[in-house]
Each structure stands twice: as structure tokens, then as C-alpha cells.
Amino acid sequence: MVQITPLKPYIPINPEEFCTNPYDIISKEEEQELKKKPNSLIHLILPDGEGDEIYRNAAKAYNNFKEKKIIKKIDTPSIFVYRQESANFSHQGLILGVDLQDYEDGNIVKHENTREKPLKDRTNHIVSSNVAAGLVWTVFQANKKIKILIEKIKQKEPIFDFEKYGYRHLLWQETNHKIIQKLEDLFRNEKLYIADGHHRAASAAEYRKIRFKQSSVDIKIKASWQYLLSYVASDDQIRILPYNRVIRKLPILEKDFLKRLESNFEIISMKQAFNPEKKNELAICLKGQWYKIVVKNKNFKTKRDSLDAAVLQDKILEPILGIKDPRSDENIFFVGGKQDPKEMEKYVADEGNDLFVNLYPVDIRDLEIIGDEGEVMPPKSTWFDPKVLSGLILHDLVEN
């Protein structure tokens, strides 16, 4: 159901030095450290400046990378296999272009709403710099034929093999037209689901609309800006970690909070920090005391309503704590990717917050079903781990 295409991108000469995590998970401290390195992608994805100067500096950084040969152009149409390895978890997928018309037609399925401010920022960024440096992570339902082709590509020597952020990163390049054609044929029967990168995808679609407005070109024109830079992985290659919530201050007494929970949850006092073992079982640390709270009524109207993040929002955050919009309410913040409940406990015991909510991870099939039903998940429901690096592939939107 989607049309994929090989790319003629830029790649870094020194990927270990150049590549970074995605812009939206880089802390201010890490950003400042990275900016001490002139050859880091950080100068493109999070440039210095104020107002529109930020976007002009992004364009300058990209041109600087080309002029100083920090990146080099690949002139042969290519598809890539990207793999991340560690002792505990490994995953892999393809890096390629996906037709943005499929995004408009709903064949690239969204499960999350974008927000106006970050979408405007990323659109301004891409319009100024004319390059996509961050991958949009999409998944397809496991396909043996695609897996066989990926393993075939991996039989050759990788063009990148380096360590960063606790993982070994490997990248293979495929230029064989027959293999690429087979992949194109196979993906015509696949639907893609956005896992991570909704704002990157939406800004690429906005850029495409701008290009159409600027010139009266045919909608089927083969231009680089017609394609979304994507990391495309099988859904059996996915690890989702919980995206937990921290409440700074309870607006009611502790005993009253527990009392109000009783209408929708069974409450079990626990002796120590723990992770929930199944869906609809939440672990909470309330002023230092851990409780297991189990949903009583599991007759949900929709798959979205059954998600623990939705249960939390619908049954606790809004009706009890008055948090209607968790994205903007200053009494809540999010913690993604942590797995050790003892570390979670520190947000209450050491940092003075009142409540930590430890959620069970979302199942990838639930995400796919919700997307197919046209529903959206609550904000920050999933933390895909490990994050795919930005800067491995730079998709120039002007050059073909």
C-alpha cells in the first residue's frame, strides 16, 4: 500500500562524531556539550540563535558540513539496512524514502496528534535548511520475504560500524536494482504505522505542500521532497518501554486520593518498588509508599480506552487531580525509558514530588489497531527504545 524509493543522500565521514540522538530527547546539558564539537549534527538540528535566526543558522550549518566535507554525497540510488546491537537487545530495519502521498492518503498511519508550536518549528527548520536529518520511525507487520531480503543485504560489509550511546551501530548500503525492486514490490502490499517522529513526518508533508504552491508541477513528479526519510522496521523488531508520569503536588490529601481511587481500582499496598506485570495494572509511588492499583471494570468501549495511559488520564488525572491537558499542565511531567523502579522512586523520595505512576508498556499491536481505527493515543504513551540515531542519512530535499 506504500511506495518506497531508494535515496541519494549525504552520509557523514565520521558517524560516531557526527550523529546524535533525535533532537527532541537531547537535554540542555547534552546539547551544550555537543556544541563544543564543530563536526556534530547538533549545529543543524538544534542551532543557536533567536527567532528566525535559528533557522538561518540551521541552513548555514548544513552548507558548512558540505563545504568542509564533513558529509559526502552518495550518487547511486541506495537503500540501507540499519542495525543497533547490545548484549540485552538488538533491532534492525531499512532506511529509505516513502512517498508522502501515502501519508496524505492514510497508508502511513498516525496514532498521535501533532501540536501547533513544535510542528511550526520543524516546518520552519526544514524549509530553511532543505534537508531531513532525523528519521521517522515506522513499522510494518512482520513479513518473512522482507526479512529475507534484509538478511541478504547484510551479507556484505557494512559501510558504518561504530559504538555510541551503549549500542553498536551498523549500516549496510544496497544499490542492486533487482533487490531494491523486490522491496518496492513487497511494500506495495504493506501499510506503515508511525512509531516515533509524528512532527518530523508532518513537517515533511507541510514542506511538500509549500513546494507545490511555489510551482505548478505535476503531483507525480519524481522529486526528493516527495519522499519521507524513514526507518522502516518489522513490528517484531520493536521494544516499547513505559512513558511514566510524575505529579509534583497532590491537590487533595493522600487519604482522600486513595479513597477516590477505590471506585475504579482495587488497591494493594506493596512493600517495595515494582514494575506492573500486565496491562490495566498500574504501579504508583505515593509519597514514598508503593501501591498496585488494578482496574476493576475492563469493559472498555475502544482499544484506546483500554490503554493504561488512557485509564490514568480518564480515571485519575482529570477527574481527581484536575489535569485536563497533560501536555501543558505544569503539575505533571513525563519520564520515558526508565526500567528500574528503584530509580523511579527517587523522583518522590529524593526530588520531593508527590506521586510517580509506573505504567505497563503499550503493545505494538494495540498501537496498530488504534491507528487502523482512526483513533489517537493519549500524549506520550510510548517510548521506543533504543532511539534511532539522527545524521546517519541526510536526505537533501532540493538535490535529486
Image (tube, rainbow, N blue to C red):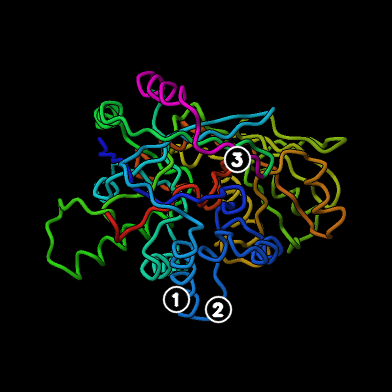
- Residue 122 is left or right of residue 273, and the answer is left
Q: How far apart are marks 2 and 3 (CA)?
A: 30 Å
Residue with the mark numbered 1: 56
Give the structural element (helix, strand or loop) at label 3: loop
Give the structural element (helix, strand or loop) at label 1: helix
In the foreground, 79 or 359:
79
- Amino acid type for the residue under numbered disc 2: Gly
The mark nearer the N terminus, 2 or 3, is 2
Q: How far apart are marks 1 and 2 (CA)?
A: 9 Å
Residue with the mark numbered 3: 386
The image position of residue 394, as x and y in percent, is 43, 53
In the foreground, 242 or 56:
56
Query: Residue furthest toward the front?
Result: 68
Q: In the image, which is nearer the foreground, mark 2 or mark 3?
A: 2
Give the structural element (helix, strand or loop) at label 2: loop
Q: What stretch is highlighted in magenta?
A: 144-164
